[in-house]
Image: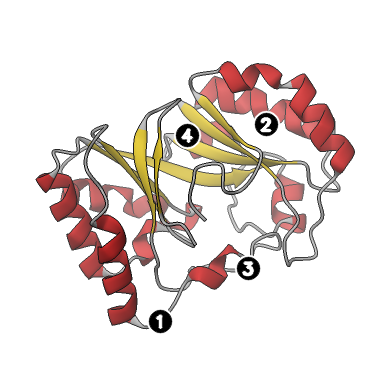
Amino acid sequence: MERYSRITEKNQREIVLLRAFPCAWGKCTFCDYIEDNGRDREEMVQENRQVLSRVTGAFGVLEVINSGSCFELPEETLEDIKETAQRHSIGRLIFESHWIYRKRLNELREYFKIPITYKMGVETFDYEFREKVLNKHAEFQSAQEAAAYFDSICLMVGIKGQTKEMIRNDIRQLKAHFKHGTVNVFNNNSTAVKRDEELVKWFMEEYQWLLDDPDTEVLYEITDFGVG
C-alpha cells in the first residue's frame, strides 16, 4: 500500500492516504475502500505520522484522503496535519467529505486557518441511480445544491446500468457548477457492482478532451494518483 505521492502535472500537490475510523455511512454498494479503516487509534496515529513525515511542502498544497471523510481522522492526526502544514508553509489543504458532514465543513477551516478545498464523492447526479443503485446516501437534488457546500466533486463512470446520457449530464453539471472535478473510471473490485467495458470505451473516446482540461482529473486506474 503506497500512502504518499506527488502530483506533478495538473494541480500540482503532495497527496497522502491516511487511515481513519470507520466511514460514518459505509454502505455504498460499489465501495470496498472502507476496509482500510480501523479502530486502533494508537496504531493509526503512528502510521499516519510516518506518512506525514514524508511531506515536504514542495508545492504548497497537500491533499489528504482516507477511507471515508476527513472528519473520521483521529484528532491526533488532525493535529499532525496542522503541524505539518505550518512547518512546511503549506498554504492550502484538500480534504474529502461525505454529504452528511456538509454543515461541519467550516470547523476544519477554522481549525487549520488556511484555505481548504473540499471534495465530495457525488458519483452521479442521476438521483435514482445514485441512491437506489449506488446507495450513496447523499440526498441533494441538484448540482447547485451540492455546489453550495463543496468546491470539487468526484464522478464515477463505466458502471453497468449507467447510460451515456447520465454521463453526459454529469460532465455538464461538473463543468457548469464546480471549480474542479475528478472523474473515476470504475474498476471491478470485491463488490457486486460491475464495470461496463463498452461504456468505458465510449467515455474515453468521447471525453478525451478532459485529459487536457486543467480543472478536471481523469483516473483510469484507482492508483493513478500514486496512492492506494
| Residue 17 - label | none
User: Looking at the picture, how far across and down is residue 91, in whole percent?
Assistant: 20, 35
Q: Contact (CB < 8 A) between labels 2 and 1?
A: no
92 vs 222, left or right, is left
- The residue type indicated by label 4 comes to Ala
- The residue type indicated by label 2 comes to Asp
SS of the residue under disc 1: loop
Task: Report, in whole angstroms, how far the alpha carbon at label 3 lies from the one at label 1.
Answer: 18 Å
Residue at x-position 52% and y-position 32%? 181
Q: Quadrant of residue 133?
A: bottom right
Check disc 4 and report the residue beneath it: 147
Relative to 84, say whether 45 is above or below. below
SS of the residue under disc 2: helix
Q: Earlier in the sequence, mark 2 or mark 1?
A: 1
Pointer 3 local density, CA inside 10 Å: few below 14, some 14–19, many at least 20 = some
Total count of labels:
4
Check disc 3 and report the residue beneath it: 27
32 vs 16, left or right, is right
- The residue type indicated by label 1 comes to Arg
Check disc 2 and report the residue beneath it: 170
Check disc 1 and report the residue beneath it: 39
Residue at x-position 54% and y-position 26%? 216
Residue at x-position 21% and y-position 69%? 76
Relative to 194, say whether 13 is above or below. above
Q: Earlier in the sequence, mark 3 or mark 4?
A: 3
SS of the residue under disc 4: helix
Task: Report, in whole angstroms, how far the alpha carbon at label 3 lies from the one at label 4.
Answer: 23 Å
